[in-house]
Amino acid sequence: MEQEILKPESGTPKGGTQAFSRTGSLMAASGATMLMLCFTGSAMVATVWAMSKLIGLPDMFMYVLMAIGVLPVLWVTVWTAGRAWHVEKLLAQHKDIDVPVFSLSYYFKNG
């Protein structure tokens, strides 16, 4: 029994055969953004709640701490949205991913 050996085509695939589209990039970037919002938000709420119950702080003070804790959660969420969209654009252009820049407005003014 003789088997035929199949070899892949040489060279890079055509641009039209790639699975990158604006809709797919938007879905991937928004998925990463929602994931970071949920993870950091739930971690912040759990940490503030546990510490306030452990120390015995009044509930009103716990709510104030949660309101303050929203700020870093929003920062991480907005930064992740910009970074995810930036990475999706690089991947669509067949480029390597660069080193992250931890500035809130970097990915929005260099878009």
Image: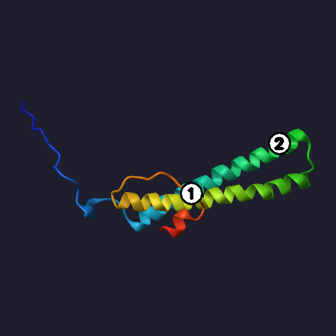
Report the Cα–Cα distance between label 1 and label 2.
27 Å
Q: Residue furthest left?
A: 2
- The answer to whether residue 26 is left or right of residue 59 is left
- Label 1 crowd (10 A; few <14 / some 14-19 / many >=20): many
Q: Secondary structure at mark 1?
A: helix
Q: Amino acid at mark 1?
A: Thr
Quarter of the figure that contains the N terminus = top left
Which residue type carries mark 2? Answer: Met
Quarter of the rendering containing residue 76? bottom right
**Residue position marked by numbered label 2 in the rendering:** 51
Query: Which tag, 1 or 2, sits closer to the chain's start?
Result: 2
Position in image of residue 54 (x %, y %) = 87, 39
Q: 13 or 31: which is nearer to us?
A: 13
Image vertical order of residue 4 relative to residue 73, above or below: above
Q: Position of residue 93 (x, y in %)?
A: 34, 61
Horizontal side, residue 49 vs residue 26: left or right:
right
Residue 50: x percent and y percent?
81, 42
Q: Which mark is on residue 80?
A: 1
Q: Residue at x 53, y 55 (%)?
A: 101
Q: Single out the residue that lies furthest toward the top.
A: 1
**Quarter of the rendering containing residue 95:** bottom left
Q: Is residue 97 left or right of residue 103?
A: left
Q: Nearer the viewer, residue 95 or 11?
A: 95
Give the SS element for disc 2. Answer: helix
Q: Which label is found at residue 24? A: none
